[in-house]
Amino acid sequence: PYSESGKSEPMAGIYRPYIASLIQSILVGENVSLHHALDVIGHIESIDATDYSWELSNINRFEDYQWARALAENEFRRVPLISVVASKRKTGKTTVVTRLVSELQNIGLSVGVVKSDKHGFQMDHEGTDTDLVYKAGADAVAIAGPTETAIRIRTKEQSNLYEISQFMPVDIVILETRSQGIAPIIEVTQEGYTEELISDPMDRVATIEIGKLDQDVPELVRHIQEMMRSLNGRRYC
């Protein structure tokens, strides 16, 4: 098979037993690459496997392994998600989330955002009809307009961010939180503060310095796009 890049993937090939002796002769030579082996073998039939580029990708680096884990984490979620965390306030999480939302929408994904705020917040406007009935004691208030819908629910404790994310009608959700988040995790840092990372390196797929968004975000979006393409292929094939 050959992948989206047009590169053949000999590790996923099917071969006749007679080439075993050829492979042995290649292994004792100076060039032991599988692509060199294909040249020695001779006639090879190729099939288009671009829909399975993620499955055919090699795990040669720790970064590759992290993204393979990210795919596995999201495979059975109703809505795939990725977390954006930082060790302290005012690091730039919201800046990164805003940039990610824009970039992911540009490649055709609908994006939801769930944010944690341990200090409380006020979403409704003072004196509106929904604000008045909520203050009167309603346990939940919803308002539906022509282009947006809002639901305000009274809770006894802080809601579970993951559970909220799984009910959002979007392709992918970004969780913004100061806690360690839910894998896969993107951690935001300021320049020179990488020693203070709080996320588990096994769950962390990227570290973004707030001053290097133009450099870091496009590569991150590419990985997310590949992950989503693979997830959609697994769900709908």
Image (cartoon, helix red, strand yellow):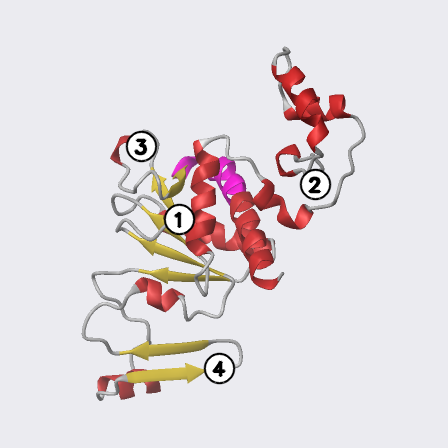
- The residue singled out by tag 1 in the image is 184
58 vs 19, left or right, is: left
- How far apart marks 4 and 1 lie (CA) works out to 34 Å
Can residue 181 be seen in the rendering of this structure? yes
Q: Is residue 218 rendered magenta in the image?
A: yes
Within 10 Å of disc 3 (Cα), the crowding (few <14, some 14-19, many 20+) is some
What element does badge 4 sit on?
loop
Label placed on residue 82: none
What element does badge 3 sit on?
helix
Q: Is residue 117 rendered magenta in the image?
A: no
For residue 111, above or below residue 7: below
Q: Are marks 2 and 3 in contact (CB under 8 Å)?
A: no
- The residue singled out by tag 2 in the image is 1
- The residue singled out by tag 3 in the image is 194
- Looking at marks 2 and 3 on the same chain, the residue that comes earlier in the sequence is marked by 2
Residue 67 drawn at (x, y percent): 46, 43
Within 10 Å of disc 4 (Cα), the crowding (few <14, some 14-19, many 20+) is few
- What residue do we see at 25% from left, 78% from top? 154
Residue 118 drawn at (x, y percent): 21, 60
Amino acid, disc 4:
Gly
For residue 194, above or below residue 130: above
Residue closest to the eye, 42 or 143:
42
Amino acid, disc 1:
Pro
Amino acid, disc 2:
Pro
Query: Which image quadrant for residue 231?
Result: bottom right
Residue closest to the eye, 4 or 119:
4
